[in-house]
Amino acid sequence: MFAKRNLPELFFFFIILVFILLKIPALQLPYFWDELGVYSRAGLYMFDNGLGLLPKDLPPVLLRGHPLLFTFFQAIGYSIFGDGVDGGHITALFISIILLWSVYFVTAKYFSKYTGLLAVMLLIVQPLFFAQSVLILPEICLAVFILWTIYFWVGKKYILFGIFSTLAILIKETAIIIPLVIVFSELALYFIGKGNKGKFNFRGKYLILFLPFVVFGIFLLIQKQQNGWYLFPLHGDNVKISLNRIFDFGGDYLAFLFLEQGRVILSIMLVSSIIYLIVNKQLTEKRISVFLITLIIGGVAFNAINFYMNRYMLFVLVPFVILSSAIIIQCIQKNRLVVLILPLIFVAGIYCTNGKEILPVDSTLNILQKFQYDENMSYVEYLKEQQNAMNLVLDKITPSDIIYANFPISVAILDTRYGFTALVPNKDFKLLNAGNIQEGFQYALISDPGSYDYKLPDSAAIVLTHQVENQTINIKIYERK
């Protein structure tokens, strides 16, 4: 009797166990791209030098103008699990499990337990989430706090809303959209629901909506005082309000959300289910659905004026998965045969996990244009070849030899804790700073995709000895003649 009553919870824990087992191989992987260049280094710096939440607690090159709560969490993770790559990735995995539990809890609360289970399974098979789930990046942590802010506001728990909206803005400034999402959702409910028959009564406790603005404003003032700027100078040009840019980026984000990574199958089923339920006058609505829809719209709109990266859509993917699950479960309740289509959705996500696409892809794109960063598991192949190329040099390096490299290899060899080598710079080899004149090195490793600010000497002085490449990366190794 107990097992039957708690079957959804038991199945949820089984799903989480399978998920953890699937992610164990990735825990030992070296750091990749942004987690290598910024977030793991920031966490390790704070681990080495003491915890803190003020801009002065990180060097500007690692701070990047962002609030520090995610780095604070990561530094605590290093303290608990160790400062190796496994410790960093275990911390990220722990946060991912919290997100999965949050999705199940919130969805089960407002829809049903089986809707929550479906939402969790759908989220796990999304290539974006599956790849991000062990990477030291703030997007999953941000998604956790944004989801709970919506939950607490809809549940009229305004103090908890204030706490979690504050925590969200201290994870990443993207959470600045939370008050706008709440306001537009309430306006929509007012005009389309019973609210338009009465007069809206403003309550003093609604002022807590502005708390994220206040907190972020205080952070910026402190940042100006301690670093001399409000926003990180290198990021200032990334935020642009241009109609052409908004339409271009917005269109690309919508295509990514609804069509790419196998979600075209989910979208087709979602639209078909909505039409079926409307025609049969059986589509039921929930108050929280309005907030989740507004969150999707607001997330796409905010990202459209920001620097373009598909991983920024993760906090938007969560409400999309929840709403999709709610519609599909409604449809299954009316027609049991719909459940037969679910395996197709899961297979589509699994098929795209390593970077494949169901829809046709432009075959004329160069390697940089095809580079998918950390949005699916193709990053593993990138790391594999990066490690192979580095080993070709590191296996024969001597303490007097000088290495020159562009990013990410230039950072990968800075610290043994990044997972690439046990050799120590300035002890087992020397590293040439990218700002110096590029003369005198014994080996150069140039990665594409990678940073393009490197400068090599004339071809008469160096010779290409190796070229390591696959579909995701090309690394050229030069030696001095």
Image (spheres, rainbow, N blue to C red):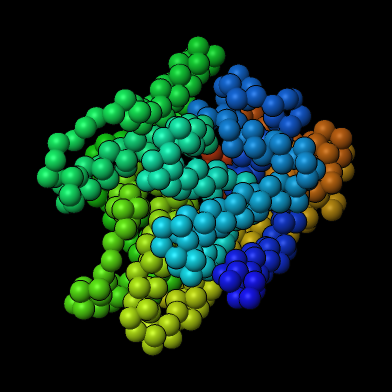
Q: The N terminus appears in which quarter of the rendering?
A: bottom right
Q: Quadrant of residue 202?
A: top left
Residue in front for this viewpoint, 347 or 161: 161
Q: Residue furthest front?
A: 1
Q: Quadrant of residue 304?
A: top left
Q: Determine the residue positioned at 30% across, 75% down.
A: 273
Q: Is residue 20 left or right of residue 294?
A: right
Residue in front for this viewpoint, 172 or 452: 172
Q: Determine the residue positioned at 41% across, 58% down.
A: 110
- x and y percentages locating residue 260 in the rendered image: 40, 66
Residue 448 showing in the rendered view: no
Q: Quadrant of residue 439?
A: top right
- x and y percentages locating residue 71 in the rendered image: 62, 35
Q: Is residue 337 left or right of residue 387?
A: left
Query: In the image, is residue 143 above or below residue 163?
Result: below
- x and y percentages locating residue 451 in the rendered image: 55, 44
Query: In the image, is residue 270 above or below residue 221?
Result: below
Residue in front for this viewpoint, 475 or 162: 162
Residue 203 showing in the rendered view: yes
Q: Determine the residue positioned at 47% across, 45% down.
A: 148
Q: Is residue 360 left or right of residue 382?
A: left
Q: Determine the residue positioned at 55% across, 45% down.
A: 141
